[in-house]
């Protein structure tokens, strides 16, 4: 399997912010395939992958399903696509292992489930959803997450999830003595269903050559993932350490709830101005207005609602 090449997350200064907002929709799903700098030649494939994922989520919503199931359906498509840095195609840590983070959050009751430093399992988001459904601890990590996944019937996946690009990317990062982002980046989705509930899901391999045990923003509620029916839902991608410092996803939905429709642009501007960091964020408001912003060169996305679909980078 092939995948796109790695791009240093901190290689560039923040780009001018791109901000998009879509009209309110009874039900809608918006997905991202990661903030970064996807090479020109790969952009159409990244956008198409995001649109496929958004359609998988939209199918759930069209059938009257929950926003929670829609975001998981969308993220599973992206985890299975080797172009993206999540599930199959995820980057490797300094030991050459997959160490996967994922989270899901349901805005109706603020239920959440997350895994961190999970070894190779095809769909970390399915395991995060199982953690949510179990209703106990919210975040399981490392060996505990592995044991839980196996006990719940998930099959470890092994080396089949490592793409042909992952090992050379790790070797390159080691040569440069760097911890690198990934052109395809983290994946995520937000959705609003016809009953007015919102949800968010995010999944990632993190950064190439990251320290063993490093956890990014993705499974940290309020940093990389957040959902509350009263506020909206958010899924973030980019420099995880910066997103954690700023609790960017929670800040974004708080801004939405305060009536600031350009909340996505506002928090990404703050990310760049306060920490000089790079990334992007997806939001959906309680009324079903989807929006996104990024200060990277690209962030592939797809959005699908009744009668409309859009994708791009
Ligand atoms: N945003 C993904 C990470 O930093 O791990």
Image: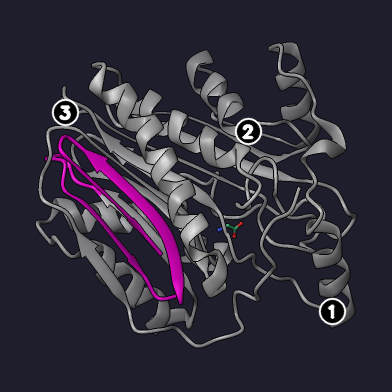
- Ligand 1, seen in the image, is in the quarter at bottom right
| Sequence-wise first label, 2 or 3 | 2
Outermost residue on the bottom side: it is 13
Distance from the alpha carbon under mark 2 to that under mark 1: 28 Å
In the image, taking residue 165 as reference, residue 82 lies left or right, namely left
- Position in image of residue 191 (x %, y %): 29, 37
Split into 4 quadrants, where in the image is the C terminus?
bottom left
Secondary structure at badge 2 equals helix
Q: Secondary structure at mark 3?
A: loop
Q: Nearer the viewer, residue 276 or 173?
A: 173
User: Residue placed at 66% from the left, 52% from the top?
Assistant: 215
Per the model, the C-alpha gap separating discs 3 and 1 is 47 Å
At x 61%, y 84%, the residue is 11
Q: Position of residue 15 (x, y in %)?
A: 41, 84
CB under 8 Å between discs 2 and 1: no
Residue found 51% across the figure and 49% down from its top: 187
**In this image, 189 relative to 127: left or right?**
left
Q: Position of residue 310 (x, y in %)?
A: 27, 52
The crowd level at tag 3 (other Cα within 10 Å; few <14, some 14-19, many 20+) is some
Decide if residue 52 is in sight here.
yes
Percent across and percent down for residue 92 are 79, 55
Mark 2, other Cα within 10 Å: few <14 / some 14–19 / many ≥20: many
Q: How far separated are the C-alphas under marks 2 and 3?
A: 26 Å
Residue where numbered disc 2 is placed: 124
Give SS at disc 1. loop
Q: Note whether 256 is above or below 67 in the view shown.
A: below
**Residue at mark 3:** 196
Q: According to the image, label 1 marks what residue?
A: 177
Q: As drawn, is 166 to the left or to the right of 188?
A: right
Q: Nearer the viewer, residue 6 or 39?
A: 39
Main structural element of the magenta stretch: helix, strand or loop? strand
Compared with residue 6, is residue 65 higher up or lower down, i.e. above or below?
above
């Amino acid at each position: 399997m092939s995948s796109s090449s790695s791009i240093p997350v901190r290689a560039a200064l923040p780009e001018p912010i791109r901000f998009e907002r879509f009209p309110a929709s009874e039900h809608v799903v918006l997905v991202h395939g990661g903030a970064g700098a996807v090479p020109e030649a790969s952009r159409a494939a990244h956008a198409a992958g995001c649109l496929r994922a958004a359609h998988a989520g939209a199918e759930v919503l069209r059938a009257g399903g929950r926003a929670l199931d829609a975001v998981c359906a969308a993220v599973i498509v992206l985890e299975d696509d080797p172009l993206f840095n999540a599930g199959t195609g995820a980057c490797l840590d300094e030991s050459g292992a997959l160490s996967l983070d994922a989270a899901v959050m349901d805005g109706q009751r603020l239920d959440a489930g997350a895994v961190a430093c999970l070894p190779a399992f095809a769909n970390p988001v399915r395991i995060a959803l199982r953690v949510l459904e179990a209703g106990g601890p919210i975040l399981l990590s490392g060996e505990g997450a592995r044991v839980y996944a196996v006990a719940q019937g998930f099959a470890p996946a092994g080396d089949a999830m490592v793409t042909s690009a992952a090992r050379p990317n790790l070797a390159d990062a080691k040569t440069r003595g760097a911890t690198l982002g990934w052109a395809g980046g983290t994946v995520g989705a937000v959705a609003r269903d016809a009953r007015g509930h919102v949800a968010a899901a995010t999944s990632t391999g993190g950064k190439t050559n990251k320290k063993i045990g490093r956890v990014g923003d993705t499974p940290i509620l309020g940093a990389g993932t957040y959902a509350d029916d009263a506020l909206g839902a958010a899924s973030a991608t980019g420099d995880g350490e910066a997103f954690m410092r700023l609790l960017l996803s929670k800040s974004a939905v708080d801004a939405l709830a305060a009536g600031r429709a350009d909340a996505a642009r506002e928090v990404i501007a703050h990310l760049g101005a306060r920490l000089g960091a790079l990334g992007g964020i997806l939001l959906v408001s309680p009324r079903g207005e989807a929006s996104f912003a990024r200060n990277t060169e690209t962030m592939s996305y797809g959005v699908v609602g009744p009668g409309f679909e859009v994708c791009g980078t």
